[in-house]
Image (cartoon, rainbow, N blue to C red):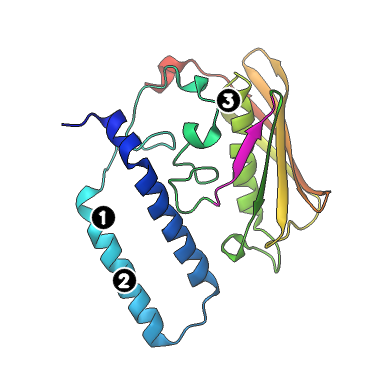
Amino acid sequence: MIDEPRRQVEHRAETTETAAAVRELIARLRVADAPPEVLAEAAALTRRASALLEPHVVHDEKPGQSHLRSVPFTGAFSVRDPAEFFPYSSVVGPLNPVAPPIVLDFDGTTVRGRVTLGEVYAGPPGAVHGGIIALIFDELLGVANVLSGVGAFTGTLSIRYERFTPVREELAVAAHVDRSEGKKVFTVGTISAGGTVTARAEGIFIQVGLDRLQ
């Protein structure tokens, strides 16, 4: 039998491709004004795909965004690529079809990335939903913590929505650790469009011993 780590590596490319196809389907459905027969055929094909996957579904006791199955966190913070560390993340995970996903880079102090969010993520007319912005900030600031060597869990997340964040326009995201006080980590970030900040966030994160995650 192939052990789990090896099997995940071998299936990663196929899972990424399948997740990308589902992501494209979600995006198309969101903006499709198709006739009933076309929608019925699309629904049948989608159910067929779901049925193909059903025999292989894993119901994990503690599902997370780092692995298909629960594994010890020991040594996990040595990973430098956010997409590798959180492959099932709903923000940066290439294996999660609801993720954009946002590709992030780290220069040693600041995490940066660019993303265009389509209609799937819309809230007010022409703008990204505020809850989606909060989701992105929670992950973005968390990634900044991990890559700075101070992985921690969200205690509070404060967001200032300065203006609408547009859909269908390239957005720039950035975050960095501002300071640490004992077990508290203070991290800040921004989302910008066209060089103008549309939202800012400050998070207070709490460092927890890895033994608590086993």
Residue 191 is labelled as none
Q: Residues within 10 Å of mark 1 (few under 14, many from 20)?
A: few
Q: Residues within 10 Å of mark 2 (few under 14, many from 20)?
A: few
Q: Residue at x 43, y 46 (%)?
A: 95
Vertically, is 130 above or below 191?
below
Q: Is residue 33 visible?
A: yes
Q: Earlier in the sequence, mark 3 or mark 2?
A: 2
Q: Residue at x 66, y 22 (%)?
A: 185
For label 2, the SS is helix
x and y percent of residue 63 in the render?
36, 38
- Residue 139 shown left or right of residue 59 in the figure: right
Q: Quadrant of residue 155?
A: top right
Q: Which residue is mark 2?
A: 45
Q: Which residue is mark 3?
A: 146
Q: Earlier in the sequence, mark 1 or mark 3?
A: 1
For badge 2, the amino acid type reads Leu
For label 3, the SS is helix
Residue closer to the observer: 135 or 82: 82
In the rendered image, the residue lying farthest to the left is 1
> CA separation, marks 2 and 1?
13 Å
For label 1, the SS is helix
Q: Say which of marks 3 and 2 sits in front.
A: 2
Which residue range is magenta in the image? 100-107
Vertically, is 126 above or below 177?
below
For badge 3, the amino acid type reads Val
Q: Is residue 61 visible?
A: no
Q: Which residue is mark 1?
A: 53
Q: Quadrant of residue 125?
A: bottom right
Q: Earlier in the sequence, mark 2 or mark 1?
A: 2
Looking at the rendered image, the quarter that the N terminus falls into is: top left
